[in-house]
Image (spheres, helix red, strand yellow):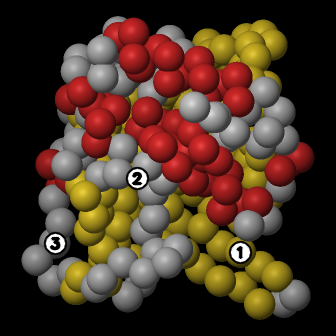
Amino acid sequence: MIVRFGVVLFSALVVVGMPGGAATAQDGFYPTEYGTVEYTVEGMQTGTMTRYWRDWGREQAEYQDLSLSVSGITQETKSWTITTPETVTNIDLVTNQGTQIANPMANAYDMSEEELEDINQTMMQNMGGQMVGTDTVAGQDCEVWDLDMAGGTMCLWEGVPLSNSAGGGMFTMTALSIDTDTAVDDVHFTVPDDVTFTTPGAGTGDVPSLEDLMQGLGQTE
């Protein structure tokens, strides 16, 4: 559960954008038009993740190749998630089945600079977040944020998470390489014709809405 929380928290923060990102959501969330970050994952789950973005982060694709071993039983997860302002598409690369839902965080893409900054600051405050220093990950300088609620830290390069930990080290993710010079191929955002789509169920491809995320972090009206 803690590992799942770490992955979901990371994904949600990446979609929303974090302090230091693009000026407005309309312009994009990231400092470059396109990019690729390769991560290693350690802790209860081990493996790799690769994140692609284009249109300044308004469109993102993420691949996960993870292994979870508990009591001698190993579970493999190979997934592909495509996030656009309109939809979130999750594909299980083992079964070739997928789900597609309306992006529950779609309203973030139309926020003004002031609204986005307010959401960012509120999220960080409710997680007990504060900047505690700087670090260098994969050759890139980033700001280290302590996230008390998650029991970990996140290192951000102008809104792009380069490392993340949660659950007191039960989940850690660290960027190994960053490429912002090579345009991202359309194949990472194109759903294959042979994917079988099913109706999303509880816990299947769920991405929290901004409202759910804020409530979960303790925000009250």
Residue 27: name its quadrant.
top left
Depth check: give the residue in front, 207 or 56: 207
Residue 74: name its quadrant.
bottom right
Please say whether residue 82 is visible from this viewpoint. Answer: no
Q: Measure the alpha-carbon separation of dots 1 and 3.
A: 27 Å
Depth check: give the residue in front, 172 or 140: 172
Number of numbered discs overlaid on the protein picture: 3
Depth check: give the residue in front, 146 or 157: 146
- At x 48%, y 53%, the residue is 208
Compared with residue 135, is residue 216 higher up or lower down, i.e. above or below? Answer: below
Mark 2, Cα crowd under 10 Å, few <14 / some 14-19 / many 20+, is many
Mark 1, Cα crowd under 10 Å, few <14 / some 14-19 / many 20+, is some
Regarding mark 1 in the picture, which secondary structure is present there? strand
Q: Disc 3 marks which amino acid?
A: Pro
Mark 3, Cα crowd under 10 Å, few <14 / some 14-19 / many 20+, is few
Residue that numbered label 2 is attached to: 62
Compared with residue 57, is residue 121 higher up or lower down, i.e. above or below? Answer: above
| 111 left or right of 163 in image | left
Compared with residue 44, is residue 138 higher up or lower down, i.e. above or below? Answer: above
Q: Position of residue 148 (x, y in %)?
A: 83, 33
- At x 78%, y 10%, the residue is 133
Q: Position of residue 124 (x, y in %)?
A: 66, 25
Q: Quadrant of the C terminus?
A: top right
Q: Which mark is residue 192?
A: 3
